[in-house]
Amino acid sequence: MSEAKLLQNEEPEEIDYMELDQIIDKDFNNDKENLIMILQSIQRRYNYIPKPALSYLAEKLGVPYSKIYGVGTFYSTFSLEPRGRNIISICLGTACHVRGGERVRERIEETLNIKDGETTEDKKFTLESVRCIGCCSLGPVIKVNEDTHGRIMSDEVKTVLDQYE
Ligand code: FES
């Protein structure tokens, strides 16, 4: 199943367990010390961490599901819910806030018809607010995936988002 098809569903119809074995056994030596990196790798594959993959990981590593679930929910970089193909991070840290970050966030919400933390129906975008992404002098700042867009004005939001498929 392609990644695009996967993202159209709330949960993937089926997890490719051979692929998970590749990640857990071959890439990370079936070692619970590598738990964070394994979770990162699973998230890169699915764009989030499907719960069946968490259960499988718990079983393989011999770690209680509750512990793995706890790690998956503790770090804000992990998502246990399906996310969009493109992740928009709007910075609402102090420097970006005073330079109009809230207005940019509102414009993104209006443009995509979603609220902070939500994903568009077509799974194209997920909007997440963050506190400082380390380039305060460029505020207000948004990141789309790995691209940083600094000194963004609310009128430019649509043009920026139109660049993403
Ligand atoms: S406050 Fe926005 S990048 Fe630092």
Image: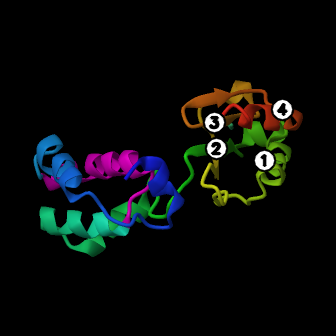
Amino acid carrying label 3: it is Lys
Label 2, on which residue?
88
In the figure, is residue 124 to the left or right of 111?
Answer: left
Instruction: Write down the quadrant of residue 121 in the picture.
Output: bottom right
Question: Disc 3 or 4, which lies upstream in sequence?
Answer: 3
Residues at marks 4 and 1, CA–CA distance in whole angstroms: 10 Å
Q: Main secondary structure of the magenta part?
A: helix
Question: Disc 4 or 1, which lies upstream in sequence?
Answer: 1
Task: Tell me: residue 165, above or below residue 55.
Answer: above
Question: In which of the image's four quarters is ligand 1 placed?
Answer: top right
Q: How many marks?
A: 4
Disc 1 crowd rating (10 Å Cα; few below 14, some 14-19, many 20+) is many
* Residue drawn 50% across the image and 55% down it: 7
User: Of the numbered discs in the image, which one, if any, rests on residue 143?
Assistant: 3
Label 2 with label 1: CB-CB less than 8 Å: yes
Q: Which stretch is magenta?
A: 31-50
Amino acid carrying label 4: it is Glu
Dot 4 lies on which element? helix
User: Of the numbered discs in the image, which one, if any, rests on residue 108?
Assistant: 1
Label 2 with label 4: CB-CB less than 8 Å: no
Question: Disc 3 or 2, which lies upstream in sequence?
Answer: 2
- x and y, in percent, of residue 139 in the image: 75, 31
Amino acid carrying label 2: it is Ile
In the figure, is residue 112 to the left or right of 29?
Answer: right
Dot 1 lies on which element? helix
Label 3 with label 2: CB-CB less than 8 Å: yes
Judge by depth and name the residue closer to the eye, 99 or 14: 14
* Residue drawn 60% across the image and 29% down it: 147
User: Of the numbered discs in the image, which one, if any, rests on residue 156?
Assistant: 4
Instruction: Write down the quadrant of residue 154 in the picture.
Output: top right
